[in-house]
Amino acid sequence: MATSARAVWFVEPRHAELREEAVGAPGEREVRVTALVSLVSAGTEMIGYRGEVASPSEVDLPTRGGEFPFPLKFAYQVVGRVEEAGPESGFAAGDTVFCYHPHQERFTTPVAAGGGNELATGAWPLVFRVPDDLDVEKAAFANLFCVAYNCLLDVPVRIGDCVVVSGLGVIGSICAFLARTTADRLVLVDPLEARRERARWIGADAVVHPAEAADAIAELFEGRGADVYVEASGAPAAVQAALAGTGQEGTIGIVSYYGKKPVTVVLSPEFHLRRQRIVSSMVSSIGSGLQPRWSLERRMAVAMRRLRTLEIGNLVTHRIPFDDAVRAYELIDTHPEDSLGVLLDYRGAP
């Protein structure tokens, strides 16, 4: 029997609202889920909220609703509990799951794009089982952890490398956390003082404003420049800074998504004379040579295991009731200095 539930919709630039819509029974390879908690992404999701998406392909998840550019129902980080499962879904009622689905109280979703359960069949998984011992709030970070982890697979940090991470949002902070395990020297860069202070838990050798980055890199890396420079800020000017701060045959990993914002760089002399590499990292795929072994399912499983020991208090700044979801977007959009991980909590809803 069809029911209804509220979902977050972007109805025009910088204007979100809750809309009621029908929720049907699951098909054979679908599940119906009651949301517990979801995480707002300050990257691609906020680009959609601001109306800065360049083309429909950038928000082309099968769970997306509406039209491009508006009205648009688009997000991708919900943890919930399965109410009812189709016989070929691979799930059962009571399972806790992470779903690539917009923020919505209850919803029915296919378990994979393309109708299957396995990446080997060409299907893209949309639902993942959450381990019983993983807190649901931690599980909400599985996708962003996977984004950061994917970047470090694309641009590995070897033992003893000198590394810079630019941008200390959730993804940049997790990139830095992962890089710290093997980097000899680690410099973190962000223009916001509050984010620099919040990132102290990572244990970097320096946490600096962009204006101070060149001096910190020169001093700590003994004039060699970075071996690996991760650009996670989403600020177009940061790409030029990455070229300047990366050393001979060093690698720049770009995990940021810029949307419509133009990125203009001057390649001479650093890029040419230093033979630098610029690597694009996007969680929807993995670099050449890794595809046979590093499926999205494996990467998500690793993310959930690693999240068990991550103190998400270092990443969460706000827990907002789903009833007040619109405020979450206003907060992230207008007060980035105060917001990092913003969770929507459905558990107090009627």
Image: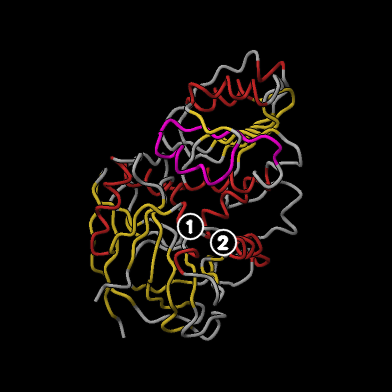
Taking the spot 42% from the left edge, 42% from the top edge, the residue there is 55
Pointers 1 and 2 in contact (C-beta within 8 Å): yes
Q: Residue furthest top?
A: 269
Q: Is residue 232 left or right of residue 337?
A: right
Query: How many marks can you see?
Result: 2
Is residue 197 highlighted in magenta?
yes
Q: Which residue is mark 1?
A: 312
- Boundaries of the magenta span: 183-204
Mark 1 vs 2, N-terminal side: 2
Marks 1/2: CA–CA distance: 8 Å
Taking the spot 53% from the left edge, 81% from the top edge, the residue there is 91
Is residue 94 highlighted in magenta?
no
Q: Which residue is mark 2?
A: 307
Taking the spot 71% from the left edge, 21% from the top edge, the residue there is 222
Q: Is residue 275 above or below residue 340?
A: above
Q: Is residue 92 above or below residue 317?
A: below
Element carrying mark 2: helix
Q: Is residue 329 left or right of residue 29?
A: left
Instruction: Give the image location of residue 277, x and y in percent.
Output: 69, 30
Q: Label 1 is placed on what type of residue?
A: Ile
Instruction: Give the image location of residue 244, x and y in percent.
Output: 60, 20
Element carrying mark 1: helix
Q: Label 2 is placed on what type of residue?
A: Leu
